[in-house]
Image: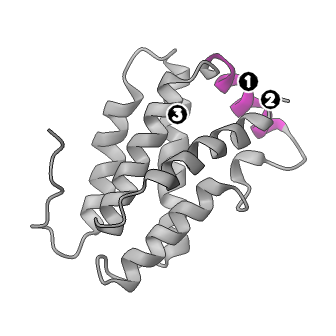
Amino acid sequence: MLFALAYKFDDEYEIWLESEDKNISAIDRLIDFNRYVSTNLEESPFKMFYADLYGLQVRTQFERHILNPGRVYYHIITRLFKEAIENGEIDEHESYDDLCKTFAIMQRGLTYDWCLNMWNYSLLDQSEKIVDTFLLSLRKNKNVVKKEED
């Protein structure tokens, strides 16, 4: 049942898809998605189970649901990285698959560290510092800045 948590979050990612702003760049949508993921993790009533989920995923010899490429999470980031490359927003120095892996590793690593530190810092703030910086570093035109929300 604990492994089903990954799929519970995919339900939340479906909600993000409904509100996705397709008028902004794919990189900016990845930034928005990163923030959405971090906020949902941070505010989830299930956060006390994350340590168990991560621990069991590491120890299992069976399917690692967190890594399942069929999850909505992976469909979203794959589509957005493909779009960013195809639109010329980022260089093709890495494949979209490699970029997706890096993005997911960063998010999982931050979540794991946040759990290790017993949620004593803002996952969203750390994610904005680390993942957003990574995403912005990929942008071809570094002068393009996302419009800040009011």
The picture places residue 56, in percent across and down from the top left corner, at: 79, 32
Residue 122 lies, with reference to residue 27, above or below; the image says above
For the residues labelled 3 and 1, say whether their Cβ atoms are less than 8 Å apart. no
> At 34% from the left edge and 53% from the top edge, which residue is drawn?
31
Instruction: Identify the image quadrant of residue 128.
Output: top left
Q: Which mark is residue 111?
A: 3
Side (left or right) of 121 relative to 108: left
The picture places residue 119, in percent across and down from the top left corner, at: 47, 17
For the residues labelled 2 and 3, say whether their Cβ atoms are less than 8 Å apart. no
Side (left or right) of 129 relative to 71: left
Secondary structure state at the residue bearing disc 1: helix
| Image: magenta residue range | 48-59
Side (left or right) of 114 relative to 89: right
Secondary structure state at the residue bearing disc 2: loop
Q: Amino acid at mark 2?
A: Leu
Instruction: Identify the image quadrant of residue 140.
Output: bottom left
Q: Quadrant of the C terminus?
A: top left
Instruction: Identify the image quadrant of residue 141.
Output: bottom left
Q: Tell me which label, 2 or 3, sits earlier in the chain.
A: 2
Q: Nearer the viewer, mark 2 or mark 3?
A: 2
The picture places residue 135, in percent across and down from the top left corner, at: 32, 59
Front residue of this view, candidates 11 and 90: 11
Query: What's the CA distance linking mark 2 and mark 1?
Result: 8 Å
Count neighbours of disc 1 (C-alpha within 10 A) and say few if under 14, some if 14 to 19, many if 20 or more.
some
Q: Tell me which label, 3 or 1, sits earlier in the chain.
A: 1
